[in-house]
Amino acid sequence: MRNKLAFLILFTLLLIGCKPSVPDGVLSPKEMEDVLYDYHLADAMAQDEDADQGYKERMYRAGVLKKHDVTQAVFDSSMVYYLRHTEELQKIYERLSDRLNDEIVALGGSTRNMGDFTMNGDTANIWNGARTMVLDPHEPFNLYNFEIPVDSSFHKGDRLMLNFESEFIYQDGMRDGVAVLAVKFGNDSIATQSIHMSSPINYRLTIADNDHYGIKEIKGFFILNRANDPSGQSLSTLRLMILKNITFVRMREPKLDPEQMKQDSINAARADSMQMKRMAPLSQQQLNVNM
């Protein structure tokens, strides 16, 4: 029993000794995650205010640091540390994305899931990536590439639509996010759509197979560009772009009803006949003038 107890104590001490730690004056990963999460909420609150948004952002962000009992110096040092330890920062972003996604669901965002689209082949959400992501201007966390598999469920004439919402958490600097969608068709021609993001609104990119060549490849990316600041960007400056409610909708070309096509043809013929009748008197008048 003594040997077992000694082994357990030694094993526990080894676990504690091997546990990753951060330097003094740097927030732990969990603390950093909590602060960034509240920063997101603070910016969202500031955007809803009628008063000066910049002033509200500064007030709410100061309130976040006060809530967590964190000084600006500690927060800045923590940003520098985690931007140099990219693996740990990536883990923080992944957890932050999950929490933001949970927030969306709690606020009713669950209405934008796969169940909203009819899955009978006419319309479907075929997005295969994260529905919420966080990007910052520093590599490799400034870029998210995606590729949508193309299979037999795609038909000629399909229309594609990428939807998402963006939010920004910026202490300063120019917000410059970019989304790009590229589609290769059956004849190897390529259509692209791109959009710059700088405001917290809904964005949409749409590409259609209007020439009925068929779709071979679908690729794209999201990127957060670094601000064009001649003085250089401080690693401690907080700049985040949050993309959420991401969907990629494939819409089937509507099938024409034969009866409706027949009726449309009849209506077109009637319209042509009426137009000819209106033109007839004018033609006779022109004939008389010429005579």
Image: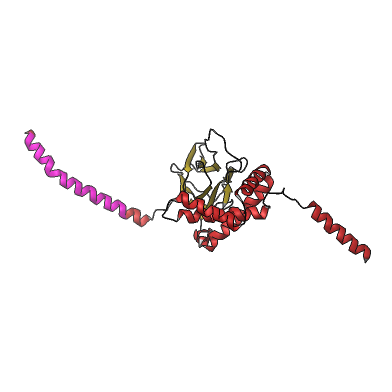
Identify whether 278 is placed above or below 231: below
Task: List x then y, in percent, for residue 60.
Answer: 52, 54
Question: Is residue 275 rendered magenta in the image?
Answer: yes
Task: List x then y, in percent, for residue 234.
Answer: 59, 39
* Residue 266 left/right relative to 60: left
**Residue 201: in sight, yes or no?**
no
Question: Is residue 282 rendered magenta in the image?
Answer: yes
Which residue sits at x=62%, y=46%?
A: 76
* Residue 17 left/right relative to 219: right
The magenta region covers 263-289
**Which is more toward the observer, 222 or 235?**
235
In the rendered image, the quadrant that contains the C terminus is: top left
Q: How is the image coloured?
A: secondary structure
Which residue sits at x=9%, y=40%?
A: 285
Rendered image quadrant of residue 136: top right
Task: List x then y, in percent, for residue 134.
Answer: 58, 49
